[in-house]
Amino acid sequence: MGTTTPPRTLAEALRARGDDSLAGLLRARPDLLNPVPNDITQLATRAGTRASVVRALEHLNRFALQTAEALAVAPDPAPYDTLLSLLTGDGLDDGEQHDDAGAAITAALPGALATLREQALVWGEDDRLRLVRTARELLAPSPQHPSPTGLGPTVAEATAGMSPGRLQEILTATGLPATHDPVSAVASLSALFTDRTRMAELLDSAPVEALSVLDRLVWGPPYGEVTPNPTPPVKWLRDRGLLLPVSTRTVVLPREAALHLRAGRAHRVPEPVPPALAAVAERDPQAVDRAAAGQAFTALATVEELLKLWNGGGPTILRAGGLSVRELKRTATALDVPEPIAAFWVELAYGAGLLASDGETDERYAPTPASDEWLDLPAADRWTHLATAWLAATRTPGLVGGQDAKGRALSALGPELDRSAAPDVRRRVLALFAGLPPGTAPDPETLLRRLRWERPLRGGAAPAAPAAPSPGGTTSGGGAEGTDLRSRLALWTLNEAELLGITGRGALSSQARALLEEGEKAAAVRLAPLLPEPLDHVLLQADLTAVAPGPLERPLADMLSVLADVESKGGATVYRFTPGSVRRALDAGQAATDLHAFLAAHSRTPVPQPLSYLIDDVARRHGHLRIGAASAYVRCDDEAVLNEILADRRSTGLRLRRLAPTVLASQADPGPLLEALRDMGYAPAAESADGDVLITRAGARRTPPRTPPVPVPEGPPVPDDTLLGAAVRAIRAGDTAATVARKETPDSPSSPGPSGALPRTTPAETLATVQAAAMTGATVWIGYVNADGAASQRVIAPVRVEGGFVTAYDHTADEIRTYPLHRITGVAELAEEA
């Protein structure tokens, strides 16, 4: 058997892969699948496009990216040993690079290289490693785009266009033999800079100030500005080619010289292994679970309170969408939390499908019909619903209060809060938590360092090299990069996970671990025993308060929230009975006898006499006044009460006048009139056009059925195994159609056509060829034009030819298809393989 020919192109390298390897490429880079490439050549072309390469680079970890960056400054192609030397150095430095670090790099490099190969960013054998051209352009240095390694251009690149006379001056100053050939001159200078002995002798003769300039440039940026009359140290470096001109005011340290000064290393600090997570505390896992369960219960209570707060119709929606700052403040005050926390709960309820806009002309937020179903679930199931919605949500409440790119404020429930990276960051943060022993609370700073190592390019540009002073005392470019979005998302995740009860006291709870690993049912089973059982009773006290020593059953809590006002929360909730709260219950259709019976049935203590008197007193006066629409009227059987209202100065704005001894008319609407009389100390009741008392029940407003917001995906979804298998078969079949050898036909020399052209045969020749192929079971190559006029080449195995149609197995589509003969432009037999 002959030796295997090394691949000359990326397409050849991909063609030599197995099906599993191709599937791995498509799994790692799913953007290559949309649409499915016709053949290997198209796959290789698409894998080299700028957008696809940028996306692939963004998914590399720090060391894989450093490996690609080293290849970008290495010769093309580069042997494996050269790449390894760029990462470990030549061992002749000042001791910064320790042996254990070199061993770690040597051990990690094969894995990093395998990752780059799998993602088609690197191809070729170990003796001829090639970085995809687009990746090299993105990572290689240029004046407009400094390399992440901090290296400048090569001597050949920096001297391109330099006059031969200037090259001769540099050679003379460095003691090299003169030559009139620019290519030889550049080669001599490059050889000097890469020769450690001669380069060391040259630097030994340099002024101390010149070495100081090189020290400031060696780790980048390699560019600096010089004045028309540079200082002597800079002039010494420039005369010897250690600083080469880029423009009249800019010089650069050539790559070969920088690598010598760096002892051959492309990176100052290679990071072959991920940073370890440090623990800030080791806690009792059971205490963590209890703390997380307590916070989960608080989360459920907060969301329920939010739904109750917006039950009759929540705040109006801004014209641009979302909540106004005022409405968010009101919601935060009602929930007794800071505004950023209120934004989180609002966004969580919205993302879980419990809140939505009602779609009316005066559009407001209100609970959805799904919220009623959610409230009927057991507490543990309600929590898993919220936690699952939070994990998948792309909306980021941490952005609320900030500004978008145009300087506009970002509001809660607004349209600009989606960040597609959020679900990936949340799950990765929790996966790092899950990798620690139970009860371990990781240090947030080490967690952020780990995330930056895993995805160094996400959320921002490539890490910039540190700024350096320019030669001659001038300033050079560069700057520190701000906090990237991915780090901010991670910090928000830590806070939100604690609020939601995913973590407790900084460590991952067992119920959250079950949610991540086993699903919602397992998490609910783990959480249920840790949540307090709802109570069916309260403790009534003589000071017109009721104490709920724990969570209440929903019917009891709903009725008590109407009959009394919440005075304080905590381990025990305190409710206060007031005339207004009792009137609210009477307005909802309850009678005084119903209220007495309710309190007697649900109190572990006797009903205090003051509370009974309060209910009876409010009930006695409730409905004594009747208000209806005239614009509005007040009706009362007791004329003295109406006389009292007319005499009260506070009623002046109502513009009341007497229509009858027991009836007053007003120009105010019934609603404002009702509230005004209540503020004056009366207990009026609204009545219908038939004279019946109107019962106002809380929570009657619901939105139409709404689906939860669909998370914005971060790039194309990862394909499943079925799709990957079908895609690989289609690409293989298309590649066969594109590369298969075709027979030349003497009587039809144009039949095979040039590469990419459709075969051309007469209708009679087409019919005869496909009939013969159907009889012999042969495979043929056809050109086909569909009903839309789109032309394609296909490899088919004809099975039956009749009625003007050929039924065949299409190798390109991997299925049986039927083709009209009149749409086949031509047919050619395939050459037999040797």
Image (cartoon, helix red, strand yellow):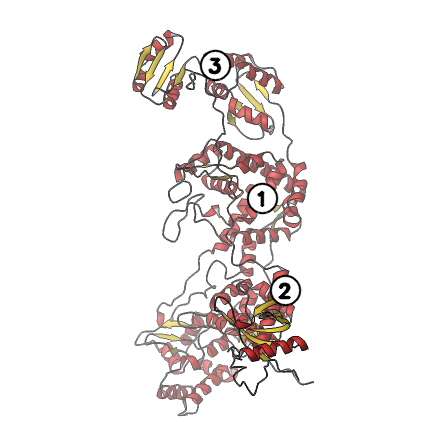
In front: mark 2 or mark 3? 2
Which residue is at the far front?
A: 803
Task: Tell me the crowding category of disc 3: few under 14, some 14 to 19, or many 20 or more residues within 10 angstroms, Cα based.
Answer: many
The residue shown at (60%, 34%) is 376
Check whether the beta carbons of the residues at disc 1 and disc 3 lie within 8 A of each other: no
Q: Nearer the viewer, residue 478 or 618?
A: 618
Q: Is residue 276 above or below residue 104?
A: above
Q: Is residue 490 left or right of residue 360?
A: right
On residue 725, the disc is: 2
On residue 126, the disc is: none
Instruction: Give the CA distance from mark 2 to mark 1.
Output: 34 Å
Give the secondary structure at mark 3: helix
Q: Is residue 116 left or right of residue 671?
A: right
Q: Position of residue 30 (x, y in %)?
A: 55, 62
Q: Position of residue 116 (x, y in %)?
A: 57, 69
Mark 2 or mark 1, which has the lower sequence index? 1
Q: Which residue is mark 3?
A: 618
Question: Label 1 is placed on what type of residue?
Answer: Ala
The residue shown at (59%, 21%) is 539
Mark 1 or mark 3, which has the lower sequence index? 1
Instruction: Give the CA distance from mark 1 to mark 3.
Output: 44 Å
Question: Label 3 is placed on what type of residue?
Answer: Val
Q: Is residue 399 above or below residue 479?
A: above
